[in-house]
Amino acid sequence: MRLVLILCLLLLALPARADGPLASVDPERLRLAETDPWVAHEIALELAATWEEPNLRAALPLFERARDEFFRLGEIRSAAMTAVTVARVLNGLSDYRGALAQTALAEQAYNDLPRDAQTDAMRVWMLVERATTQQNLSLYEDSNRTAAAARRIAETLGDEGLVASTWWVEGINHEGLSQFDAALAAYGRALSFHTRTEGNRSLNVGFLASNIGWVYTRMGNYPEARRWQETALSIVEPQIGRFTDPTTKLRINIGLVALEEGKADEAIEWSFSVMPFIAANRTQMLSDQRWNFELLSRAFAMKGQVDRAIFFGKMAVNAQQEIRATNTVTGAHDVAASQAEWRRLYQSLADLLLSQGRVGEAQAVLNMEKEEEVFQFLRRDVTAPITQTRALLTDAEMAQEAALAALAEAPVAAERELREIMARFDSGEATEADEDRAMALQEALQAASDAFDASVAAFMAEVPEPQRAGLRAGFDAAGSYQAVLADLPRPTAILQVAALDQATHLFLTLPGLTLHREVAIPRAELARLVLDALTALEEVSPQAPERLQALHRVLFAPVSADLAEAGVEVVMLNLDGFLRYVPFAALHDGDSYLVEHYAFALYSPAVPTQFAAGVRAAEATAGFGVTKAHAGFSPLPGVKAELDTIFGDVLTGQTALDEAFDETSLRRSLLRRPGILHIASHFSLQPGREDDSFLLLGDGSRLTLSRIRETRALRFQGVDLLTLSACQTARGGDGSEIDGFGATAQLNGAAAVMASLWPVSDAATPELMRVFYAGLIEEGLDKAEALRRAQVAMLTGEGMASGPARTAEALDEPEGPQGTSHPYYWSAFVLMGNWL
């Protein structure tokens, strides 16, 4: 899909108004606009600058009023200029025939004006708008002739910018005619001008990069297509935002590239990421709907989900039918070129329907594609024009269409707006309008809450009975935590993930809202992705980011937009089974690791967590470690350096190594209630076997989990953080052992526990711990943020050599690049419980 030239209206990029296009306009200005064309024109420009359908519709009558008044007053130049702007707005509303009529009106006006540089420049923009309109009707040869006429005028003016615009238009036409080399050459001319005059990160450069990427897509050069499209997105989205017309096109383009690469799931993710904007700007986005719904239809067909493929195929056909209806004025020939270009939508849908034996529906779709006048197949009503027909949706498909329309609603934004209004109530600044708005938002959020409850009920019905109790407890806890989240000092969310046999479910809890997302990936396939990622991590493989990106697409991408919109900084994780092994901090979104954006903490629904910052002092700490070999366990020579680094540079409490670390010394230390207790040793965890799960003490004895649970003197009362810098502390079975140990330590009094998911590096761990504790003690950070910053420091640090892994058996030093940037070195540690 190409990005057309959208002149100054888009570049203004004013924020959209959520309370109606005209609600924020001064009533006095609106009154003046009825008689003063300049005021009407000014208000219309402000509205149209957002380039969103509701505002375009509100702007259109104001522009038309200004145009007519300018003509009446004899201000021909202003009238012609406004007619071109009206054409631009009509293009935005998919009324291409109306846009052509406006360019004809403007041309007639320019012909009545004396020839001068200003008039000629405006004539060029009129011709560019006409050429763009012709493109929208697939009239590429006509558009090329119009662009050439515009270029001849621009060249006589010596205006390189206008000339570049005509090359831009011509590039789109060549691409539409499958003249790919000519398209690349034309785009190259325009790109050269904009790069030279605006730099290589301007919006125009981003738009052209997308068009070049689209040509490479058409040519089948998908690596090059992806490179150009991702470059375009990195330029455009940060400047104008995600939910905008150009960014929507860019995201669809990347989805189309992914589809051609055979990556159906990625294509679907890109496609659904733009659905809120499409749903909120339905008519404006008709041309984009064709691409996006066709993408989804092909992607679901690729996945073997034929019913969904048929549904989205019908939506694509109906978008084309609506464009056809809007632009048919004098007969079928008005949209003949467009129908020829998009004939594949009808044929592909018919093929899908036939594959399911739905012959009648297939025949109706093929009849719609033809030029004869027919109506619904079953009625054979030949008196109705073809432009009124649509692909008929079944009851189930109509429900899906309603669900798509619901994507226009923004519950996260509604919850945020409600909090802002309630803050005004708290400060005594709320107005009567605020009261009305608050009540409306509360009703909307209640509806969203009811819908969520229904989705949970449907979800639970699919869950095998043994899993239901634990998951139900998780939902109950998440609901009770909504109020807790609102009181936390940093924007926080709870993400609950549950993997079922055929799908993975994500439940995101925000202070006033819980959302549900479903990912169609079987539990076994997800388990394989987790295993592949963990293997790549522990082998320090260069493939680790790619494996972690595959996990990100399933476990985080579906809620990433919601988290970003809510401004979340801390994500509390309630995970199911083997998902507890996933280092969420190391998940990769294709550009960066999640640790660069979020702090993470695990929480167990079984343990009510008291969120409060503990008293932290360097001296109120204690450290224990094991360096020597014991039966069944290898030596840990790096532990002494770890304790020396931590307790020499940051902490000042007492430490004990090897024989000095026994149950008695640990109990004596607990009597003094250290705020931070750091233990570096082996820990063996056996799921469901407390008597066989134990911490190895320095004298070789084993302190079992059952003894810790049952012995009053071994309770961790007053311990704000228990750190187990040990060998594979938190992994050893089906994932339940992680919750089991975390729950035991917290029920025994520890406010929070930090443990490792795999054998950690003796060389890297001391530095990570030093930075972590410095953040807690010296900077006053909360535990989650201190861990995040320590991990980021390891990720970005240089000159830090990798070292031998700490392990219970001989393990070769992992092969990998020097330094600690690989996630193996920094992402093993997970924080459980009170992260403040």
Image (cartoon, grey):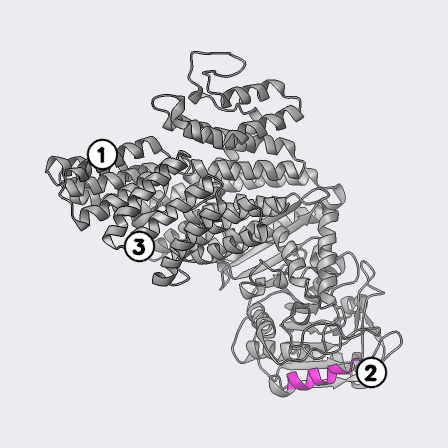
Position of residue 721 relative to residue 271, above or below, is: below
Could you tell which of marks 1 and 3 lies nearer the N-terminus? 1
Task: Tell me if residue 639 is in the magenta stretch.
Answer: yes
Residue 553, image x, y percentages: 61, 52
Task: Tell me if residue 185 is in the magenta stretch.
Answer: no
Residue 186, image x, y percentages: 41, 50
What is the span of residues highlighted in magenta in the rendered image?
Answer: 635-647
Question: How many neighbours does mark 2 have within 10 angstroms: few (below 14), some (14-19), or many (20 or more)?
Answer: some
Question: How many neighbours does mark 1 have within 10 angstroms: few (below 14), some (14-19), or many (20 or more)?
Answer: some
Mark 1 vs mark 3: give the one in front. Answer: 3
Residue assigned mark 2: 628
Position of residue 374 relative to residue 227, above or below, is: above
Depth check, front residue: 672 or 303: 303
Depth check, front residue: 179 or 207: 179
Q: CA distance from mark 1 to mark 2?
A: 90 Å
Q: Residue at x 22, y 37 (%)?
A: 107
Q: Secondary structure at mark 2?
A: loop
Q: CA distance from mark 1 to mark 3?
A: 25 Å
Residue assigned mark 3: 161
Picture quarter containing residue 262? Answer: top right
Give residue 105's mark.
Answer: 1
User: Which SS does the magenta portion mostly show?
Assistant: helix
Could you tell which of marks 1 and 2 lies nearer the N-terminus? 1
Is mark 3 in CB contact (under 8 Å) with mark 2?
Answer: no
Question: How many neighbours does mark 3 have within 10 angstroms: few (below 14), some (14-19), or many (20 or more)?
Answer: some
Mark 3 vs mark 2: give the one in front. Answer: 3
Picture quarter containing residue 737? Answer: bottom right
Picture quarter containing residue 328? Answer: top left
Q: Please name the amino acid that badge 3 sits on.
A: Gly
Residue 362 at least partly seen: yes
Depth check, front residue: 58 or 209: 209
Depth check, front residue: 545 or 367: 367
